[in-house]
Image: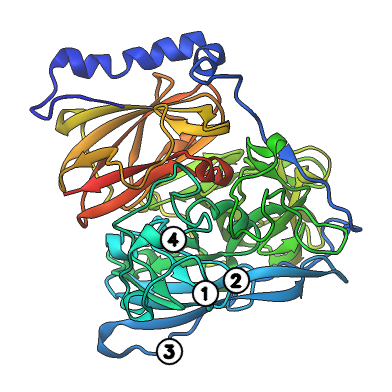
């Protein structure tokens, strides 16, 4: 990482922002690949060992919206319990899952802009957990830092008085069992805040209306925890958005897309080095690039089908897969493509709609799109397919047009007027980051600027209110996520952003050899945050860094 002086940028510096990116583009993948100590790995796919259902036979489930336990004092209070359950994902097959409140996905939280939310999480799982609200503008104490653990009953990895742990503070020096930096670099985190059994997270909900999601973020074990089921959706709404006339009610569909694989006993297959997730982190060697499953789930159902009216529908799409990328197209059975009109990105509505023929979506990205079934024959079918997949992983889900209907919805030309207008000339710093494979200890890891994650190392320190430009380069597929803030994409490979890059983002997909510039203002709260690759296996194997706001 290289930082420029804070005193402002010269014209030469500003012009140079795109220069090195153009060189990277001209050189292509070979230049980016030499950033690693060996060619960049790609993900490997697990093969299920149980019979799989035919596509488009299982109805699409819609996750339940959680009701608050209290709404007094202008705050909506919720309770969630993390627990293991046995349930059916594949018809007739019992699978063991780790869940929020017994369901996968977890229940959806619906918040109102400006109305704070508190959620008390109780950990009844056999391992420590951490909850991160992905995309949330959240105080550091509730952001879900990877070592801010909620310990389960009887956990022996932390010694010391129960009183210290219960109060939320604990000396990490006695923690073992590979739950903290013991697993990554042999170091401890003196700033970690550890609780036993319960933790309350507070979310101010002061940000633009958008679709967020919550998931486990435990140090070294994020990937297998999400794979086992610890993920759910969190939507922020406000009156202005609801007045636009966009499709709503039953015609607004939250769609969490994931891939999984199933072992012969029906449980989820995952190549963890330690299947208990208690001690040794990491995956088998062939999966270090990321874990793919051979079953595509939408809202926890395999290749589902959903009956729709002949009308417009709003699809709020989340890629909650560990590593799999999707390029989604809507195709009729006679081969015709339907437009997908993008109205929102990770951090809320766009300024104006963008009409796409396909939506590329990397892990942790969200796309808010409208699809129009008006004029489709009753009984006809539209398939959502992944053109990056092959065989059964090309199929995602289907919509069957079941009935004629009136439709009072619309897609207004102006969606939002509150997007930030940061300029290069506002930037007080320009930083370069390389996301690449490399050696870490005795094995393969994933590094930022040649270094694995260390919670005790301040990688980036900046002041609240500062605008910065970050230049990101990648050797392989790396969806890069910033905590706390959203950003705009300025350039991709030295050129204008792609059509789907518009709007305010918190995760940007870098393909092999790509270079991307982003701009943001660091605002909200001081404290320790993160930026990292959201390929969850890469994240667990070192591809995170600290962001300190003062």
Q: Inspect this view and state whether residue 400 appears.
A: no
How far across and down, in percent of the image, does residue 185 sit? 44, 41
Residue labelled with disc 3? 69
Bin the neighbour count of mark 1 within 10 Å (Cα to Cα): few under 14, some 14-19, many 20 and up.
some
Callout 2–callout 1 Cβ contact below 8 Å: yes
Q: Nearer the viewer, residue 254 or 453?
A: 453
**Residue 303: which quarter of the image?**
bottom right
Q: Secondary structure at mark 4?
A: loop
Q: CA distance from mark 3 to mark 2?
A: 26 Å
Q: Earlier in the sequence, mark 2 or mark 1?
A: 2
Please give the name of the residue rendered at 44% of the width and 70% of the height, measured from the top-left corner.
Answer: 150
Question: Which of label 3 and label 4 is nearer to you?
Answer: 4
Residue where numbered disc 4 is placed: 175
Find residue 286 and report its image quarter. Answer: top right
Q: Residue furthest right?
A: 51
Which numbered disc, 3 or 2, marks the residue closer to the eye? 2
Residue most extreme to the left: 7
Name the residue tied to disc 1.
152
Q: Quadrant of the image for the N terminus?
A: top left
Of badges 1 and 3, nearer the viewer stands 1
Q: Earlier in the sequence, mark 1 or mark 3?
A: 3
Q: Is the C-beta separation of discs 2 and 4 under 8 Å?
A: no
Left or right of 394, for residue 527: left
Q: Alpha-carbon neighbours of circle 2 within 10 Å: few (<14), some, or many (≥20)? A: some
Q: CA distance from mark 3 to mark 4?
A: 34 Å
Q: Calculate the distance from the C-alpha at mark 2 to the C-alpha at mark 4.
A: 16 Å
Q: CA distance from mark 4 to mark 1?
A: 14 Å
Residue that badge 2 annotates: 126
Residue at mark 1 to residue at mark 3: CA–CA distance:
23 Å
């Amino acid at each position: 990482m290289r930082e420029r002086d804070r005193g402002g940028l010269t014209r030469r510096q500003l012009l140079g922002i795109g220069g090195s990116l153009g060189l990277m583009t001209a050189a292509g993948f070979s230049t980016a690949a030499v950033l690693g100590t060996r060619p960049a790995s790609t993900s490997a796919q697990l093969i299920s060992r149980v019979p799989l259902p035919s596509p488009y036979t299982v109805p699409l489930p819609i996750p339940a919206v959680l009701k608050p336990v209290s709404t007094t004092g202008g705050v909506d209070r919720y309770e969630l319990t993390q627990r293991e359950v046995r349930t059916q994902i594949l018809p007739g097959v019992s699978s063991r899952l780790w869940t929020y409140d017994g369901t996968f996905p977890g229940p959806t939280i619906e918040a109102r802009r400006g109305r704070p939310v508190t959620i008390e999480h109780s950990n009844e799982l056999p391992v420590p957990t951490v909850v991160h609200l992905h995309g949330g503008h959240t105080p550091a104490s509730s952001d879900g830092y990877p070592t801010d653990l909620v310990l389960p009953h009887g956990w022996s990895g932390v010694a010391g008085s129960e009183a210290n742990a219960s109060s939320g503070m604990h000396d990490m020096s006695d923690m073992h069992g590979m739950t903290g930096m013991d697993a990554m670099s042999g170091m401890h985190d003196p700033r970690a805040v550890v609780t036993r059994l319960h933790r309350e997270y507070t979310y101010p909900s002061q940000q633009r209306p958008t679709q967020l999601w919550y998931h486990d973020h435990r140090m070294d074990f994020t990937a297998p925890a999400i794979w086992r089921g610890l993920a759910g959706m969190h939507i922020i709404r406000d009156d202005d958005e609801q007045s636009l006339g966009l499709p709503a009610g039953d015609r607004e569909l939250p769609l969490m897309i994931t891939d999984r694989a199933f072992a012969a006993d029906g449980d989820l297959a995952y190549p963890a080095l330690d299947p208990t997730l208690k001690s040794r982190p990491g995956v088998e060697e062939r999966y270090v690039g990321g874990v793919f499953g051979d079953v595509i789930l939408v809202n926890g159902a395999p290749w589902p089908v959903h009956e729709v009216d002949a009308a417009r529908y709003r699809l709020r799409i989340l890629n909650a897969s560990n590593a799999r990328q999707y390029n989604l197209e809507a195709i009729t059975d006679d081969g015709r493509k339907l437009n997908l009109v993008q109205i929102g990105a990770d951090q809320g509505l766009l300024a104006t709609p963008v009409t796409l023929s396909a939506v590329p979506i990397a892990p942790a990205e969200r796309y808010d799109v409208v699809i129009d079934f008006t004029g489709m024959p009753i009984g006809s079918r539209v398939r959502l397919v992944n053109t990056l997949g092959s065989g059964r992983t090309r199929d995602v889900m289907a919509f069957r047009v079941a009935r004629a209907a009136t439709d009072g919805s619309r897609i207004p030309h102006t969606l939002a007027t509150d997007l930030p207008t940061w300029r290069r000339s506002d930037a007080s710093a320009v930083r370069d980051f390389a996301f690449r494979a490399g050696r870490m200890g005795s094995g393969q890891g994933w590094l930022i600027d040649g270094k694995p994650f260390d919670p005790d190392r301040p990688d980036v320190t900046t002041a609240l209110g500062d605008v910065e430009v970050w230049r990101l380069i990648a050797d392989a597929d790396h969806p890069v996520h910033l905590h706390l803030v959203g950003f705009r994409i300025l350039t991709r490979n030295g050129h204008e952003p792609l059509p789907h890059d518009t709007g305010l983002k918190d995760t940007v997909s870098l393909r092999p050899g790509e270079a991307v510039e982003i701009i943001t203002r660091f605002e909200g709260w001081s404290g320790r945050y993160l930026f990292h690759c959201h390929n969850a296996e890469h994240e667990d194997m070192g591809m995170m860094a600290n962001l300190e706001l003062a």
